[in-house]
């Protein structure tokens, strides 16, 4: 568990569906405590790549290559192993977190059931939840609410709180802030940064919003047509080489264009 | 068709029944004027009253107080040709593009329907559809496609073409680019900008993103929880915000090359939250102090910028806020 060692290491990953190669990634890794941004347009293969990490590819997909999580091969791993990793050690925060919550359960019950499912003893559950709520700055009163009684930003925080309570080592954030207002988006983004700092959580942020990712990530990978076409620190964006990166940079509505 | 039209809201108040804080309206807007050739932005987060304002201007919700007038006539009193003129001149572009189109109707038919609604004849419908598709940069062959067969950006262009088919003078756009990829978003904004110039349209653009409105609108009205907190020329408002919420909004827009900054005060004094007439932003404001921010806040002009109005009792002492600090 030393910092600097890779928590996630993907090598020569190829995913095909019905004869079409949709993902072809030679190398992608996240080291412990790192925030990596994976940026691309719709259809670039971002979500398929995430699904493959979780072992949740569609049944007609074929996959080659290697996905190491903390040194353990996840590709073709038995379900028993995947179930332990998925959700607990690797947490997922999706665009519509509200849909991930169960509509008939209060959020507190929902978090508690997930902790039970992953075998956390009762005595520990309460302290973990209290710590998690504090970490994501949520008022404990929200534990008594149902998902439809939460705002979009609150639902997103609840989903992140569960990741904290489970002490996830890696968070996969798939467009986790794109449905939120810019102000709320900025608050959730700040939260990711705090989690990395305070809990040492590694985060893979997948988004089409280059500017948001650029302000948060230690490294940015640009994906187009299933492959990484450009990679670098946030400074790569000041001199983008690849056509897709240039387009993404140009598309960012900068405030300099104001009338 | 009347070319010199004018849509004006005065002392508008909208209250929703059954909502908490009944003491305060969901929207209070002292003045908003829309004319062809000018664009105004309404900016704020969810619950700020942006969409409510747009709906009141369309006449689909009735204000609890104040008026919306089309060429001097309150919307509720428009009859006959004046009512028809209003519906043709003022066209909405809704946020939910997918819900705006009938899934069983092909795009060409949807646009032709707009053409007939605007008083066009069925004979030249086909030619008009082709011309409008070209105007929004869609291939004519797309006319026979259904909404699910085209991309999100193409659907948004088709919705804009249908609105144009009616022959509007004012477009009321509610988050027209949300849910689209960044590169698609910028092309839709370019399209709206071009249409505005070529057709001399007036725009009301509703968005939570200051970056989106920056390039399209001369005037910006910032709403926070139903109240106007600041209004003025867009450029001045972005570069030299006076209200702490405007500064926070500006900071929240992610920009390449600018490291991420937290937009709000994480440890605000919650005792300042929701005093009867106090500042609604106080609980998140880094400049809030008791007891002044608990007092009634008025929308007041700024001495050295006559076009600017700010609702912040501390504004005279705070002055121009650094938008990037």
Image (cartoon, rainbow, N blue to C red):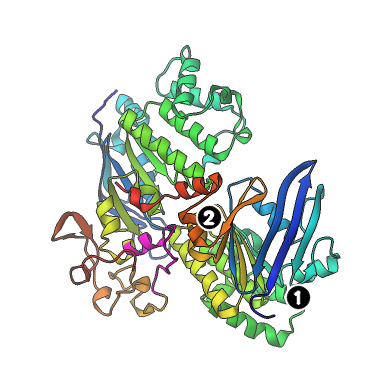
- The image position of residue B322, as x and y in percent, is 29, 66
The chain containing the residue under callout 2 comes to A
Q: Nearer the viewer, residue B106 or A58?
A: A58
Q: Secondary structure at mark 1?
A: loop
* Residue plotted at (53% across, 62% down): A233
- The image position of residue B48, as x and y in percent, is 38, 57
Q: Nearer the viewer, residue A167 or A157?
A: A167
Q: Is residue B80 above or below residue A60?
A: above
| Observer able to see residue A205 | yes
Q: Is residue A189 above or below residue B96?
A: below
What residue is disc 2 on?
A179
| Observer able to see residue A105 | no
Label 1, residues with CA under 10 Å away: few <14, some 14-19, many ≥20: some
Per the model, the C-alpha gap separating discs 2 and 1 is 29 Å
Please state the extent of the stretch shown in magenta in the rendering. Answer: B247-265
- The part of the image, by quadrant, that contains residue B293 is bottom left
The chain containing the residue under callout 1 comes to A
* Residue plotted at (56% across, 69% down): A157
- The image position of residue B325, as x and y in percent, is 33, 69
The answer to whether B200 appears left or right of B91 in the picture is left
Q: Nearer the viewer, residue B11 or B50?
A: B50
What residue is disc 1 on?
A118
**Is B249 included in the stretch rendered in magenta?**
yes
The answer to whether A105 appears left or right of B192 in the picture is right
**Is A155 included in the stretch rendered in magenta?**
no
**Overall secondary structure of the magenta section:** loop
Q: Residue furthest right?
A: A78
């Amino acid at each position: 568990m030393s910092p600097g060692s890779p928590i996630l290491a993907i090598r020569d990953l190829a995913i095909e569906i019905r004869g079409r190669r949709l993902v072809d990634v030679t190398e992608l890794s996240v080291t412990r405590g790192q925030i990596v941004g994976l940026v691309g347009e719709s259809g670039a293969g971002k979500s398929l790549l995430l699904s493959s990490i979780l072992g949740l590819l569609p049944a007609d997909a074929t996959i080659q290559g290697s996905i190491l999580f903390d040194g353990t091969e996840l590709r073709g791993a038995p379900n028993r192993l995947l179930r332990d990793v998925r959700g607990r050690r690797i947490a997922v925060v999706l665009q519509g977190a509200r849909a991930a919550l169960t509509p008939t359960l209060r959020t507190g019950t929902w978090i508690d059931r997930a902790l039970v499912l992953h075998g956390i003893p009762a005595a520990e559950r309460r302290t973990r939840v209290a710590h998690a709520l504090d970490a994501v700055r949520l008022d404990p009163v929200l534990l008594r609410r149902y998902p439809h009684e939460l705002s979009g930003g609150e639902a997103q925080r609840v989903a992140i709180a569960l990741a904290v309570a489970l002490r996830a080592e890696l968070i996969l954030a798939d467009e986790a802030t794109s449905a939120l207002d810019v102000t709320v988006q900025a608050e959730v983004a700040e939260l990711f940064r705090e989690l990395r700092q305070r809990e040492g959580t590694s985060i893979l942020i997948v988004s089409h919003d280059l500017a948001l990712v650029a302000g948060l990530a230690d490294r940015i990978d640009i994906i187009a047509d299933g492959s990484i076409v450009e990679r670098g620190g946030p400074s790569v964006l000041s001199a983008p080489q690849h056509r897709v990166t240039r387009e993404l940079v140009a598309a960012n509505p900068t405030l300099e264009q104001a009338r | 068709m009347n070319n010199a039209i004018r849509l004006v809201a005065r002392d508008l108040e909208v209250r929703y029944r059954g909502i908490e804080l009944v003491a305060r309206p969901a929207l209070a807007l002292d003045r908003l004027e829309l004319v062809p050739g000018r664009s105004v932005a309404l900016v704020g987060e969810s619950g700020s009253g942006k969409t409510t304002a747009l709906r009141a201007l369309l006449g689909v919700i009735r204000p609890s107080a104040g008026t919306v007038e089309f060429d001097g006539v309150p919307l509720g009193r428009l009859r006959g040709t004046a009512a028809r003129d209003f519906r043709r001149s003022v066209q909405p572009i809704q946020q939910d593009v997918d819900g705006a189109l009938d899934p069983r109707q092909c795009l060409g038919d949807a646009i032709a329907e707009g053409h007939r609604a605007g008083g066009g004849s069925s004979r030249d419908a086909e030619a008009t559809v082709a011309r409008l598709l070209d105007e929004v940069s869609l291939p004519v062959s797309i006319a026979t496609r259904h909404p699910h067969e085209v991309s999100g950006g193409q659907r948004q262009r088709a919705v804009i073409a249908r609105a144009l088919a009616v022959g509007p003078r004012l477009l009321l756009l509610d988050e027209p680019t949300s849910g689209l990829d960044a590169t698609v978003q910028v092309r839709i904004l370019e399209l709206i900008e071009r249409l505005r110039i070529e057709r001399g349209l007036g725009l009301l653009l509703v968005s939570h993103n200051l970056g989106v409105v920056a390039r399209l609108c001369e005037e910006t009205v910032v709403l926070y929880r139903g109240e106007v907190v600041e209004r003025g020329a867009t450029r001045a408002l972005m570069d030299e915000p006076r209200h702490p919420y405007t500064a926070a909004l500006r900071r929240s827009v992610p920009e390449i090359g600018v490291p991420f900054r937290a937009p709000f005060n994480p440890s605000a004094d919650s005792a300042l939250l929701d005093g009867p007439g106090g500042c609604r932003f106080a609980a998140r404001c880094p400049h809030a102090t008791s007891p002044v921010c608990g007092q009634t806040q008025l929308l007041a002009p700024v001495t050295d910028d006559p076009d600017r109005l700010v609702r912040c009792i501390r504004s005279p002492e705070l002055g121009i806020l650094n938008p990037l600090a």
